[in-house]
Image (cartoon, coloured by chain):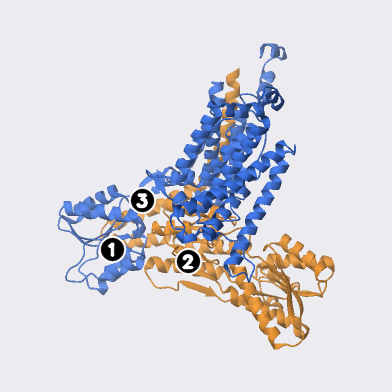
Chain colours: A blue, B orange
Amino acid sequence: MKRLFSEYGSVLVFLLLCGYYSVVTWSEQHPTNAAAGRSLAQSIIATHGAQSDTLIIVRDTVADRVFAKAISTELARLGGKVRETVFAKAPVDAGRALRRISPDDPLQAVATHHAGTQWGPLKVERLKRLATQLSLSHVPRVHFPESYMWPSFLTWSNILNVFKNNADIAIIAIGMTMVIITAGIDLSVGSLLALSGVISAVMIQRWWGGEDAGLWGVIAGCLIGAGICALGGTLNGIMVTVCHIPAFVVTLAMMMVARGLALIIAVDYQSFLSGGGTKGTPEAVKIDHQAFGAFSNGELFGIPNPILLTLLLYLLAHILMTNTPVGRYIYAVGGNREAARLSGVPVMLVLIFVYTLCGAFAGLSGVMDASRFEGGRPNAGELYELRVIAAVVVGGTSLAGGEGRIFGTLVGAGIIAIIQNGLNMQGVATYEQMVVFGSLILAAAMIDQLKKSTWALRMFELPQRWIKRPGRRETLQ
Amino acid sequence: MKCFRFVLIGLLLCGLTGCGGGSSSSDGASNEAATSSVTGAAGADGDSDSSGAGAAASGAVAANGTIGFSVLTLKNPFFKIIADTLTAEAEKQGFSVLVNDANLDVDTQAKHLDNYLSQKVTAIVLNPADRIAIGPAIKKANDAGIPVFTCDLQCVSEDAEIAGHVGTDNYAGGRQAGEAMAEVLGEEGGDVLVLHFKQANSCVLRVNGFTDVVNATNEERTEGKINVVAELNGGGLRDVGHNATADALVAYPNLRGIFAINDPSALGARKALEEAGKQDQVRIIGFDGQIEGKQAIKNGEIYADPIQFPDQMAVLTMQNIQKYLDGEEFEKVNLITPKLYKKADADQDPDLK
């Protein structure tokens, strides 16, 4: 039991958090899907009879079109009549559609969804006024699908959002896990992310023609951006190994240098855009290329690309860490660097490799960020290093090195992501929850420490000593 | 004996999550209250027409929907006023408001917008943290059919559709600041420092208005010109403004005026002047008209502020949302002209000590 608890402590915390937010966000849900449309059509026929005349008013969106289509097909099947389907760009269009009703041919029902019922023209008093103005024989009735209770947290769209929006943290955390397993640290990831995004954006805009850039131009721009970050990582690794500077200092310096470079490039580019006369502002470098945004905002089989990419990278990293000599070297270097060196592990190469990989993952995340915002942001990734390190540590990797699992980090990143999402869903009225969840992170880390550390054992032995007579100490292992 | 440890840890965890539950139980209760009134209105809506009127009346009190508001930063009192006024105004009209603090980060803000979409809010209000990079997030809201309103700061991404914008006419405010500077420096002119914050386009507009007036004044004069000797980053913050001013006083000892793009950086500049003992030599023009800025004007620490009206911005934004939902016409872009506020105004201001 102890093993189970300590190995999967972070998973337990993850599930607890999910459960907690499900309870807190338990609220009314308003369906707008095909099934809701069909049952709405059935209830209209049930209220007004088969000969009823219906006006469908929805918004001009993909989901609403499906909903409206379902209503009209079902109404047609049951013999009802659809007068018109209005795809309103704004509530004002709904009002216009309703004013087209004539007294000779009064309307019985208006079908819409919950969002539609919040529009002024569909409110009961407005409809009544309209009926008097147009001297209709009766007021048309507004029908909308029944709502049901369900946690907003546990909706498909929210869960996809949580993981898609934090894919960059999760991906950098892979590299960070490896660095921390070697008993190092990398504070430069957030700045490298920004540098990569800005360089990619400028490359695509300036050298590959922006809007007209071909696919290869875009890929080359991204590769250069991510590649420069990988080089930054290599430099970190060389400084740590060859020059024996502590990783904390090296990467802190790199953090400042990379952020500065990202800002310089962005400002110079803006200044270049405005003709060179004025100084630029550190705003995002806009990428005009149409398809570029699809990398982060697109989806495959209904799952957003960033999530798929994250899972793929985690799988590859897991294989690397468990089934290859490189993985064993990384653990060995972190466990005891001197022993590893004496056993013939190429310590320097291994360290340079992990820092390079960490930089490359930061670069990749930068490209993803640029794609998500359709522009390279020099201010991107601020304080990411802390969130990434938190994800890694919560996932059970020891900051002392030599220990940690890749999938543990995935769970850790999930915990960080869910905490953030939960705080956002409830608005700022809940600052005190940050305290609670800070403590929860601490608890997660504590459970993971159970499996190896002696302080936890000692701490929990104390009350036993108070209960039992002191002489029993020998019998405890 | 081993089990004892796990019981302890378990208790610890329960305690923690229990805390969490406790702190949010009030939220849950208010949520419940809101939803129950929604269902009440919906049920009555489905009834006959006679009871429909009652339903509409109760609906107008509590069930008009939720508005998501992603604030640029709640650390700046200016945006706090917008958030508070918007919340109060929305509650009067039967909306509930979900306020999120974007902390100046467009990444956080985009997450807020995604959240609003999955929570299916009625309308979104935001102060864009980056006028370009927020575009894709707004586009997603457009695709989901949820109207987006901007307040104070504008979004310039071309394909993002904004239902309405309310802001300050920052260029006009900058011109007022320039006129005030020309007035306070008088015939002699002199060296002037600008405490800039280039990240915000609103501040760029303010400085543009300011320099345009300064240049026009200089063209009329043969001597006693106003020289903008430096544009330093004041960060829009007290400490950054203080340090920048302290450095500038060393580099330009003959400085006679400072234009700071908001009140915090103006107050930081004032602090630096006092430390250098130059508060009588250098006059400050601020911007914003936050309460501490107004107080400083009354005390003679700042010469004048073009003041903005954050409360009016929130009220107008809320009116626009209501008009949008009601299908009425409204101004898509509404810029409020600031007003120059000097010591004479401050002496009559009842809010000040």
Q: Is residue B291 above or below residue A230?
A: below
Asked if marks 2 and 1 touch (Cβ < 8 Å), the reply is: no
Kind of residue at disc 2: Met
Which of pointers 2 and 1 indicates the residue nearer the eye? Answer: 1
Chain that bears disc 3? A
Kind of residue at disc 1: Val
Please give the residue where the numbered disc 3 appears in the rendered image: A30
Q: CA distance from mark 2 to mark 3?
A: 24 Å
Q: Quadrant of the N terminus of chain B?
A: top right
Chain that bears disc 1? A
Residue A226 in sight here: yes
Report which quarter residue A277 is drawn in. bottom right
Residue at (27, 68) in percent of width and height = A98
Element on which disc 1 rests? strand
Dot 2 alpha-carbon crowd within 10 angstroms: few under 14, some 14 to 19, many 20 or more: many
Which of pointers 3 and 1 indicates the residue nearer the eye? Answer: 1
Kind of residue at disc 3: His
Q: Position of residue A262 (x, y in %)?
A: 62, 55
Element on which disc 3 rests? loop
Please give the residue where the numbered disc 2 appears in the rendered image: B318
Chain that bears disc 2? B
Please give the residue where the numbered disc 1 appears in the rendered image: A86
Q: CA distance from mark 2 to mark 1?
A: 26 Å
Residue at (58, 69) in percent of width and height = A274
